[in-house]
Amino acid sequence: MEPEVRPPRETAIGRRVFLGLATFGTAGVIFGSQIQGWLERNVGPILAKDPTGLLQLLPIGNFRIYSVTTDLPDRSRAQYRLTVKGLVEREIVLTFDELQAMPRTRLVRDFQCVTGWRVPEVEWAGVRLADVLDRAGVQTEARAVRFVSFDGAYSESLTLPQARRSDVIVAYEMEHAPLSREHGGPARLYVAPMYGYKSCKWLDTIELTRSVEPGYWEQRGYSVDGWVGHSNHRDDERTS
């Protein structure tokens, strides 16, 4: 059963504060990840509802950051565990250190939200999802992969061929820094060629399934296949 998502408490934000944050946001575009990290640590999170009722942080740096629950979940690297289960040869539970010890990959890609905004040339680092799946062993009847967030509400799914792409990773760094709480840390899914809603933040569980199970937003009308495609002309595979 999907947990109830209660309406978030709104935060009263004055016009001067909003304009000040907007100025900082512009500075984030100009000066990059350093000022964005400072803003996240010292200014955010400031929570408000957008017109759809979605909990949203006001723009900080280059990104708009959303949550479908009443707060942003928090888990340290020491506390972090990633479970891989379902149609696998062996269920595994990875600590953050074990995840980080796996072969590392790096991606430089645009991050595009389905609502229209985009952050160009974001650098991500982590582990290819295919390597995580291989570590557990995929049973022959598995056709899809389901992802569950430790926020208690969010889920997403990919077909198995989509999940095995080299530009689909479990990310733990962004722009040469540890992945922050606001961006889904300690680790999140990052699906480079799809819209941001496919990249499950605060990744807790990976489950191999017989078919694609619609995720949080697909149950609310979004496309199950969230390809960006030619809308940002970035579906190439620059990896290292």
Image (tube, rainbow, N blue to C red):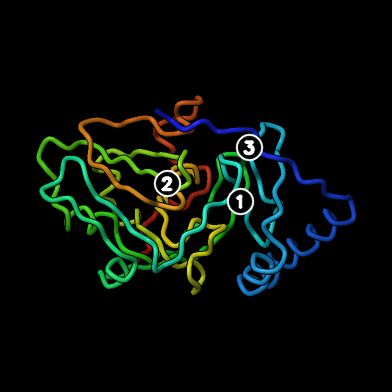
Work out whether mark 2 precedes mark 1 in sequence or the reverse, and give the earlier one.
Answer: 1
* Residue 40: mark in rendering: none
- Mark 3 surroundings within 10 Å by alpha-carbon count, few (fewer than 14), some (14 through 19), many (20 or more): some
Marks 3/1: CA distance?
Answer: 10 Å
Dot 2 alpha-carbon crowd within 10 angstroms: few under 14, some 14 to 19, many 20 or more: many
Rendering quarter of residue 40: bottom right
Q: Are marks 2 and 1 in contact (CB under 8 Å)?
A: no
Q: Residues within 10 Å of mark 1 (few under 14, many from 20)?
A: some
Badge 3 marks a residue whose secondary structure is loop
Compared with 35, 86 (above or below) is above
First in sequence: mark 2 vs mark 3: 3
Residue 204 in view (yes/no) = yes
- Residue 20 lies, with reference to residue 58, above or below; the image says below
The residue closer to the viewer here, 223 or 231, is 223
Is 235 positioned to the left or the right of 231 in the image?
A: left
Who's the residue at 66% across and 45% down the image?
56
Check residue 149 in the rendering and tell me which mark sits there, or answer none. Answer: 2
The CA distance from mark 2 to mark 3 is: 17 Å
The secondary structure type at the circle numbered 1 is: strand
The answer to whether residue 134 is left or right of residue 109 is: left
Q: Nearer the viewer, residue 38 or 90?
A: 90
In the rendered view, does 159 fall on the left or right side of 76?
A: left
Task: Give the answer, above or below, for where 15 lies relative to 33.
Answer: above
Q: Amino acid at mark 1?
A: Ile
Helix, strand or loop for disc 2 = strand
Mark drawn on residue 65: 1
Q: Tell which residue pokes out farthest to the right in this image.
A: 16
The spot of residue 216 in percent (x, y) is 46, 33
Q: Which mark is residue 54?
A: 3
Q: Earlier in the sequence, mark 3 or mark 1?
A: 3
Q: Amino acid at mark 3?
A: Leu
